[in-house]
Image (spheres, coloured by chain):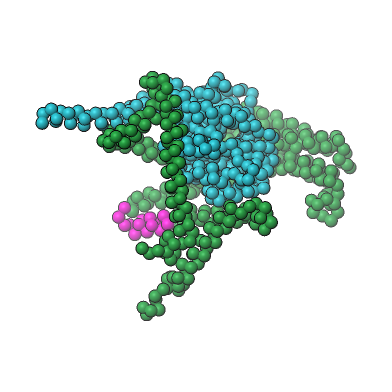
Amino acid sequence: MEERNQGLSGGGVRRDTRALALRVITFLGGIYFFLYFITPESIIEGTKIKSAHEAISNGFIAVSSMAIGLGVINILMAHGSKFIFLKRGWQYSAALLLGLLIMIGSTLAHWMMTRHSASQIRDVQIIGDFAARIVEDAKLGAGNERSFSPTGVPELSKRVSALESYSLRIIEKIKAEESRVIKIAQGDLATTQLIRDSEQELLGLRESVSTLSANQWNTLDATNESALAQVSQRAAKVASSYAILKRKENGTKFSSRLYDFLYDGLFNHLGASMFALLGVYIAAAAYRAFRIQTFESGLMMAAALVVMLGQISFGKVIYEDMPSIRQWLLEVPNSAAFRAIRLGAGVAGLMLAIRMWLSIESAKSGGDKK
Amino acid sequence: MILAVGAPVFLGISRAPSRMVSAERMYDVMQGVTFAPGEVAMVWLDFGPNTIAENEPQAVVIIEHLLRRRVPVVLLSQYQQSERFLTRVPQEVAQRLEREHPGQTWRYGEDWINAGYKPGAAIFIQALVSAPDVAKFLGRDVTGMPIAHFPRFAQIGGVERVKLVAEVTGLVGVFDTVVQFFQKKGYRPTLVHGCTSITIPEAYIFLDSGQLNGLLEGIAGAAWYSEVLRKHFPASDNRDLLVTNTALSAAHIMIILLIALGNLIPLLNRFKRGRHG
C-alpha cells in the first residue's frame, strides 16, 4: 500500500509528473516574453507573432486575473468555515463576509447601471455614426466591400428614411428622460442649465433630421451631404450632453450612492486613517530610536535634517540656500549611492527571476529542497 | 503630533511652499510638449487611500495643467484601489476650471477619458506599446463605451502618438515598469512622475539619467507646482494644497524637535551622572 501511495497526489496524478508540467509551463511562459523583448522587430514581424502578441498577452492577463477569484474563494473557505461551525472569532469572520458580500453586490449593481447607461448613450451616438456611414458608402458607390447584400448597400433613400425614423424615436426617448431628470434636479442650477442646453441641442437635431425628408435622395449631392453632416455633428453634441445627464441621473440612484458611501466614505477614509497611524509611530521612533551614537549615524542625521528642512517652507527661514543644498544632496551623493543599491538589487532580482523561471527556487516544483 | 498637523488644517494656516527646482523644471517640460491633433497624454494614477495625501494633489496639478492646455488625457491605472480617483479627480478639476472660466466647458469624452484599471502590469504595458491601435487595444472606458467612439481619442493610432506619460504612484515597482517597458525602438515618451517623499531618493536616479523628464517630490513638489501654475494662471485656487503642505511642514518640525530632544536628554543625563559619579 505504501509503495502504491508513494509519489501519488490527489486524483492519482504522480507528483513528479505534476512538477514536470509546472516546470514546462513556467519555462515556456517565461521564455516567450523574454524572447519577444530581445528579438529585433523585423524578425518578429517576419514570423507573424506580432499580430498574435496582443491576444497572447491578454490570455496571460486573463489567467493572472483569476487570482482575484482564487482570493475570494480562499476568503470564503477560511472564514466561511469559521462562521458556519462557530469557531473562535466567528463574529469577525461574519463581519468580513458581510462586508465582502455588500461590496461585491454594490459594485455589481453600480457596474450594471453604468453599462446600461453606456448602451443608451451608444444608441444616441449611432445617429451620428449612421449619418457619416451613409455619406461614406454613397461615395464608395453600390457593391462596395461593406455591403451585406449581393447588390450592395440598401438604396440611399431607404437608409435616410431609416435614419430619420430611428433619430426621431431616440429624440422622443431623450425628451422623456429629460423631464425625469428635471424633477431630480430640483433647483440644482447647474443641472437645470445643462438640461436647457440639452433641449436646445435636441431641437437642433430634430430640425436637421426633419430637413432630410424635404430633400430628394436619388443621389448624394452637395446639399444632401451637408444635411447629413449637420445631423452627424448635432447628434454628437446631443450624445455628449446626454452622457452628462445620464451620469448626473445615475449619481442620484441608490446603487450609486451606496457605492460612493462604501468606497469614498468608508474604504478611502479608513485606508487613509490606518496609514496616518504611522505618523504616531514615526513620532515615537523619532524620540526613542533615532539616536546619534556614531560618526556615521551623525552624518546620516545631518543629511536627513538638511533634506527635511530644504523641503519645507521654514527651511529658508533658517538658511536661505537650504533648498539648494538639499537639491545637491539628492542629485549627487544620493544618486550615486542609490544607483549602486539599485544595480545590486537588480542583479539579485535577476538571479531570483532566473531561479524561478527554471523552477529551481521552490521545492514544490522540484527545486532545491535545502 | 496631532496638534502640529491639525492646527494648520483647522485654522486654515498656509505658508508659501519651499521652492522645488524639479517641480519648476517639470512645468517647463509639460508646457514644452507639443500635441498634434490625435495625440494624447496618458496619466497613470497608481495610488490608493494610503498615499492619498501626497499623490492626489500631484494628480490634481498634473491633470489641471493638461486640461488647461486642452490636451486630451487618457487616464488609467495598474492598481485596483485607484478606481475612484480616476473618476473623481478629473471631474473635480474640470468643475473648478469651469467655475474659473464661465462659458467654457471641460467634458468627459472630449477632454479626458477614463480607461480604468488595467491588470497585467508589465505584460499589459508591453502589449499596449506594441499594439497598432491604442484606442482599440484599450477597448472600452469604465462606463463600457468603446474608446474608438470618442472622436478625440479614436485617432490615436500607435503608441507613438502618446506624447506624454505621467505616472503618479507611491507603490514600489510600478514606476519602474513604466520606465522599462513604456518605450520601443525610435519612441520614448516624455515621462513625468509624482512620487511620495519616501521614494524621492529612488526617483532621482532616473531624473539624473534622463529616463525621467520631470518629478514632483511628494506634496511639497505638488505645492510648488501649483504655485507655478498660479503664476501663469492667477485665478487658479491652490489654498487647500498649501494648507496641507503647511501641516506637513509643521509635522517635519515636530519630528526634528523630537529627534533633537531624544538625543539631547540622554546626553544631559549622561553629563549629570558624570558630574555626580
Image quarter of the N terminus of chain A: bottom left
Horizontal placement of B240 versus B183: left or right? Answer: left
User: Vertical placement of B239 versus A18: above or below?
Assistant: above
Horizontal placement of B126 versus A335: left or right? Answer: right
User: In terms of depth relative to the viewer, which is nearer, A20 or B154?
Assistant: A20
Q: Which residues, given as a range, are shown in magenta?
A: A74-89
The magenta stretch spans residue A220:
no
User: Vertical placement of A140 versus B215: above or below?
Assistant: below
Answer whether residue A77 is visible to the viewer in this image: yes
Looking at the picture, how far across and down is residue B200, in whole percent?
44, 36
User: In terms of depth relative to the viewer, which is nearer, B181 or A242?
Assistant: B181
Chain that is coloured cyan in the picture: B
- Chain A's colour is green
Magenta region, main secondary structure: helix
The magenta stretch spans residue A82:
yes
Q: How many marks?
A: 0
Looking at the picture, how far across and down is residue B110, in whole percent?
65, 35
Answer whether residue B9 is visible to the viewer in this image: no
Horizontal placement of B218 versus B129: left or right? Answer: left
User: In terms of depth relative to the viewer, which is nearer, A158 or B140?
Assistant: B140
User: In terms of depth relative to the viewer, which is nearer, B132 or A158?
Assistant: B132
